Image (cartoon, rainbow, N blue to C red):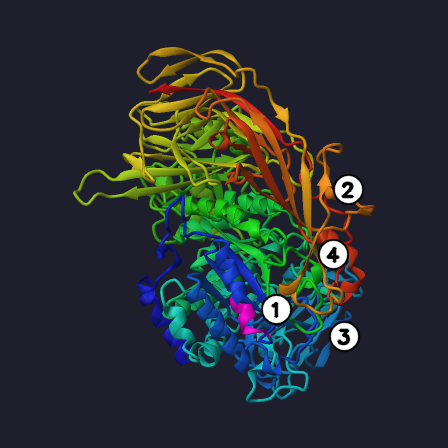
Amino acid sequence: MQLILFLSFTISLALAQNLPQDLPRGSFSLPNTGVKWRYWIEDADVDLDALRSDISEMAHVGSSGFELLWQNYGQQVIVDPTEVAFGSDRFVTVTAAAVQAALANNITIDFTMGPSQGAGVPVFPEDVDKEGMNTELVFGSHFIEAGNSFDGPLPDPTIVPFVDFVGGTIEGANITSKKLVAVIGASLAPGSNTSAARISLDFNSLVDLTAQVQGSVEDDTASISWAPSSNGTSVLLTYFSRRNGYPEAKGGFNGPEPDKPGSWGSFVVDHFSPKGANVTASFMQSNLLSREDIGAMLRQPGVGQYMWEDSMEFVGQVFWTEAFPERFVERHGYNVSLALPVLHSLKPIMRSQEPNQTFDYGDSINWSRFTEDYSDTLTTLYADYMSALSSWSRSLGMSFSNQPAYNFHLDTAASAAIPDTPEIESLGVPTIDQARQLSAGVHLGNHPIFSSETAARLGEAYAIRMIEVLEDAKTQYAGGVNVVMLHGYAYSGNYPNTTWPGLTTFGFFFADMHGPRMPAWDHYREYLDFLSRTQYVLQEGVAKVDLAIYRKDYNLSESQPFQGTSLVEAGYTYEYVSPENLKLPGVSVIDGRLAPSGPAYKAFVLSRISNITLDAAQRLMEYADSGLPIVFVGSTPDDIPGYEVGDEQKSKVKDLMNELVGKPGVKIVDNEEDVAGALKGVGVLPVASANPASPNLYTVVRQVEDGDDDGCDSEQTAHFYLFNNNVSTSGSTTGPINFTLTLNPGFKGTPFMLDAWTGEVSPVAAYTVDDDSGVITIPSVSLAPAQTILFTVTTASEFEGVAAPSSHLTGIDEGVVAVGLSDAVAELRSFEEGEKQISFDNGSTRTVSFSLDGEVPRELDGWKLNITAWTPPVDISLNDTTQGLFVHLPPVDLSTTGLVPWDQLEIEGETMVNVSGVGTYVTSFEWDHAEDGGVGAQLDFGEVFHTVKAWLNGVRIPTADPTNPVVDVSALMKQGRNELRVDTASTLLNIINAVMVSLSVSRQFNFPAGPQHYGLIAPVTLIPYARVNVLL
């Protein structure tokens, strides 16, 4: 109890903590905003030098931190946990070493609040049945035929065994006690069958018999007498709460030992009460943070970042907590006993915990209103749990992060407003629209960081391509995320019963085991720098969103709550707002913007909403009176969510809606496609739009205001992230989006283009601007499928050290690209010869002549290939990944075959189908133009299967974007002979397929895969262009 009081007290200290957004960010070219890693160690049976090496490797590729996870789910427990599990003495030693390594490598560490997914901590099994542990609602039943009565002990509840993802039984703590919640009697609805899996009851016959119970549940003397008045069959339902003892990790092989927490096993805590947070905090404080200076080290700036919890994947029949009945009455004004009979109809979202028989109210009432009220109440209790952990984490000098709400029947946007840094995952939240079902909570909760566990693709262990990793990250960014936590990095040292290529989590079920065991690891830095620079921009300032869309629902919706792509095509950004979010501080309308210091929504949309909370209806009235446009699709709501005794709130909602639709700026449209027109009709324009429109172009906006010390007007900066969400790595594509871009930052500024691959910032050379509105139009923008582009508009005189030019081009002929080089000069490029017209912002025009001087595109040939094959040791059971076998294969002359995938090659009669590794390609070509002449060149790699590094004349070529692998090499070309070297790295899949049978000891799940096509697999083309410099 003392710690619970302490947790409440620390709320006042929250502002004093060193939060992630306060850490040094670096610059766009050299950012400190790198990706993070999910780092898995099975247990504390690790070599500390290997652990330190792993953390050093993560830092080496530009990462900003890692998440330390213990005892991976889905793995067979091989080593007795007693001396090495979470909570053991060795666990403390390993944790201290990991924190020290994070400090030494200048990266942060996030600490999971328990083994596996961090949902529970070690608890002595005999003590699991206590306050603060995972609690469920269970029930028993007894049918009573017409004319009969019941007189006897309360029917025992059905206890459903735990099962894992493949149907195996999970052993939990032995819990025998329970507490009575209620006893309910009801008549069966006409036509109901007592042997059916789902039985309908007559709601109007419901009676609460709890007060009639005699004796005590605690001593097994509880009984009841009841004579139903129904002429048909009735049922007696008994409801109990109990700790269900769901395990998070297994205990010692020889049972629990009181003085060895590693032997206890870990059990899930109550996630709907601060008492659950108290159990976690107490264990962590006593068994970890107070030992070996771990707490003091974590408190240092830039070291300990998050106390963290993964997605909730534990189970219960119906989640419960002691405070639930009281909170339910506070929220909904009636006793929870009315809802109890239908709660088990809420099908578990994770694994099955359903009794064989459940009940509902059939047609006698809309019984989904009761499950709605249950989920609403549970959400508020879940918020209490997260708030307590946030307060505790901040008291440690850290903050709290988790993956909130989804997988459970909880309000996602309401929940996302609570943790300091909410997190999602590309596996469980794969679409932009689903991410937006949480992002409003992040933004309205004033959380600058939105994280994602990214690239855990199913069935792609040792097979995921870099283009897939990047695509997952870019998709998450488009949903509002601005930090990706890559999945993942597995401990590289030896581990019992593990074969080459090393510890592999999830039994080869999910991607991936990144690190030096992968042939491409030495290529990762440049690709991750691209993500770091993108995150640098997306962490600037505050997210700005055009539209708030009302959503009162639970868990994630796979189908879009706002149907269709009309808003995307029109260029509007939007996210889904829970009515609970509207109660947060700062969510009011000022100058026509909702939550102006946050997302600053320009309008509120309600699409086919049949009900709305009374509080939300009242707030909409306030918003409309303050000038916020509101658009309804279909009709206005005429009801409230959930069940109401009487119709007072429902009547008020109807009256408010009738009044609301008469106000200026409030519109009703028939279909979703009409919303964009209605918005433009009331003056609400999108922040960015394309001509022609595209259903695949998504935009994210971040805005910064910097006030001057001398009291002058503040400088304004807006960043624009644009993403082509078309299919790229899995299915057919329709090609790039080619469009004219319109940016509407809300102020007049200078546009810059930011190259996240090179770190270069350059002024946009050709654009028009409306002097009154500041709207900027940029011609000839092109995005390949899954490609991104970054623009910044600023009122400042410079951006990232690059001066804003005093003049610019306003028009260029089709086929000409203008590149901003300096304040006074722009380079014009054309792949076609001839005369082209350009115009300037002073109104003048000019004709420019372009000449290719006889050059045409040419495929490079004469390639020589040397492959260094990564092979397993002769005895793969000797898991020493630091001593892998690297075999230099005989060189291959590709002069006659051209560039073909490795699996189509033979070297000295041996097929290369099962070869993984690094291939070095070399060739040369002639170039007959001066280095500063009128002809430049691009190098088109055609297709990048995984990763490439290239050098021209011994100088590194900028890393090619795998979605559009074309790189300008003009500055590296020389007149005469030019030498080109290209290194391509593969995944490990092909060689793993060759030894798959031998890997069966750790390959619990087998996903047979054909060979991947490694190497340079498409022609590499030199593409010349004509160039002319013009004075601006």
Task: Tell me, for residue 905, which label it has, or none.
Answer: 2
Q: What element carries label 1?
A: loop
Residue furthest to the right: 909
- The amino acid type of the residue labelled 1 equals Gly
Task: Tell me, for residue 493, which label it has, or none.
Answer: 1
Dot placed on the residue nearer the N-terminal end, 4 or 2? 2
Of residues 831 and 398, which is closer to you in this image?
831
| Front of the two marks 3 and 1 | 1
Whether pointer 3 and pointer 2 mark residues with C-beta atoms closer than 8 Å, the reply is: no
Q: What element carries label 2?
A: loop
Which residue is denoted by mark 3 in the rendering? Answer: 148
Which residue is denoted by mark 4 in the rendering? Answer: 992
Q: How far apart are marks 4 and 3 (CA)?
A: 68 Å
- The amino acid type of the residue labelled 2 equals Leu
Q: Where in the figure is residue 652, as x and y percent of width and height?
A: 44, 47
Whether pointer 4 and pointer 2 mark residues with C-beta atoms closer than 8 Å, the reply is: no
Q: How crowded is mark 2: few (under 14 residues within 10 Å), some or many (20 or more)?
A: some
Q: Where in the figure is residue 267, as x and y percent of width and height?
A: 59, 75
